[in-house]
Each structure stands twice: as structure tokens, then as C-alpha cells.
Image (spheres, rainbow, N blue to C red):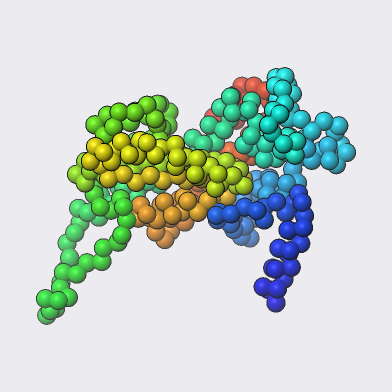
Amino acid sequence: MAEDREEELLVKAAHQSVQGRWIGWTNYNQRVLTWKSLVYGDPKLYRFCLGATFDTLGSPANLARWGIKESDKCFLCDWYGIPEDPDKPDKLKGTVANILSGCQVSLAQGRWKYRHDSVLRVICHHLSLFLIQVKKKSNDNLVFVPAGASDGTRGRAKVRAGLLRSAVDWILLDDLGRRLVFPAHIAQTSQRPDIVLYSSSTQTLVMVELTCPCEENFDLQHMKKLDRYDKLKDDCELNGWKVFLFAVEVGARGYVAHSLTSCLKRFGLVGKNLRLAVKEAGDEALRTSFWLWLLREEPEWKSIGFHQQKR
């Protein structure tokens, strides 16, 4: 009965041209809103999450559709006199998706970079903790053999799989706070992946590129980022390095793509560490998008000071 009811709701959502657009999203992790999170969390934040998901926020497009305002233009583009893009469909102008991840003024002012760097900082934090755990466990490899154990069973230790477990000399570089300089002994390039991990002992290089688009653009941005670093990957491999390239996405509405989950699994994160890293990355994207939404009609958003505060 529950499955039949779920199918009925999905069919109903598929026939809703506005509130049911989330049906077209693919390759993402659903957000779980528990009673505990609703009771102890910020109700305004969850209200924003639901409104952004089902497109019920007071965007210019919605206000014009509801008859509250006459214009459906983006406030920032109209304020600065930015002409409308003829290549952009009319249905995308002034929408929630445009405000969260499409406005050219917001892009030029660094609003999207603020969200991107906030999410990247969370991911780097969890990777740093994981590398510390790997190094600590590698220094404690004593295996106690039970008395009377046979040669076939003694000394057997359970080894967990994971790319970052293959070495203990990993160097983590990130593109936060300063311009990342790609290691010159690996390849000469001006490109700057968001995260660079390399181990000299195993000649292994890992590159991670993060994108924070709207959830409907996950697949497009994933392929775009992979193509962007194909040449750099080939150059590093020609220099004798084993290269792993990952493109990960965290949505502007706080939904995390499967690409980030699979990437962290390849690194070796499992269980609670994996779930916490994915959850906090999505929460950070949602939090920053919420503050950017509140400042959507502030032409000089940096003067407000909200972007410098950890909420």
C-alpha cells in the first residue's frame, strides 16, 4: 500500500509543470528530514529548502505568475542594467534556479565562489581528518596472534580498500584562500583543480574538481569538468604518474550528487565518516544558498557582512 501511494504521488508530481520539476533530477542523494532535525534545526532554513525544491519561493518569475508583480526580471540584472541574454529561454529568467546559480551579476560579484569555497572547505576538512587517521593506523600495525593458531590463519589482518590507504605520504593541496600552484615536478600547467593529492612514494596523483550547480545540471557540469582536465591528466601520465580525476557536484539547493559519494568511497571513507562528510557538504551548500537568497536584492552584498559569518 505504501508503494502504491508513493507511485500515485510521483505520477501527480510528474503532471505539475512547476512544483514537479524535481522529477527530472538524476544522480543525487535525497535529503532526509527527520523529526529531530525539524525540531532542533532552523525552521527558516528547512522552509527555504522545501521552497527551493518545489519552486514555491518568491522569485520574480513566481511573483509575476501569481500577479503580485508585473516584471519577472532578475533584480540584480535590472539594477545594474544588464541586458537580457537572447540565448537564455524566457522561462529561466528570474526563476529560483537563475537566482541560485545563473545570475551573471552574482557570478561576477563572487557570490557563487563564496558557496563553492564554503563547500570545498568542508570536503577538505574531512579529507584531512581521514589522512590523519590513515597515517595513525599505519604506525600501529601490531597483530596479536592467538596461542596455538595455525600458520594459515596467524597474522591475517583485515585490510580495507581505499585509494588514500595505499600510502602515508599524501600531500593535500586546495584552492582555498590563495591561488593553488600545481606541483611543478608533476606537470607544468596554469590550471588549478580544487583539490590536489599526490604521493611521491607511489607516484600517484589525485585531482578533484568541485561544482555547485543547480541539481538539474549535475550531468552537464560533470562531463564539462572532466573534459576540462583531460589534457592535464594525459600530461601527468606521460610524466610517469598514475592519475585519478574526479568531478564532484553539490547542488545549490543542498542535494549532493552521487559523484561525491562515489569519490569519497574510492578514497576509503566508509560508514559514519562517509555519511557525515556527505551530509555536511550538502548542509553547507544549503546554508550558503539561503544567505545568498536573503541578499538577492542587495547590489553590494559584501558590505552586508553575512558572507563572512559562519551560521
Left or right relative to 147: residue 28: right
- Location of residue 54 in the rendering, given as x and y in whole percent from the top left corner: 71, 50
Question: Is residue 195 at least partly visible in the picture?
Answer: no
Q: Choose between 251 and 220: the one closer to the eye.
A: 220
Q: Residue placed at 78% from the left, 37% from the top? A: 61
Q: Choose between 235 and 39: the one closer to the eye.
A: 235
Q: Residue placed at 30% from the left, 36% from the top? A: 235
Q: How many marks?
A: 0
- Location of residue 295 in the rendering, given as x and y in whole percent from the top left corner: 67, 31
Q: Residue placed at 59% from the left, 28% from the top? A: 107
Q: Choose between 28 and 150: the one closer to the eye.
A: 28
Quarter of the image with the N terminus is bottom right
- In the picture shown, does residue 268 fall above or below 170? below
Left or right relative to 120: residue 173: left
- Location of residue 204 in the rendering, given as x and y in whole percent from the top left corner: 26, 44
Q: Choose between 257 and 235: the one closer to the eye.
A: 235
- Location of residue 171 in the rendering, given as x and y in whole percent from the top left corner: 28, 39
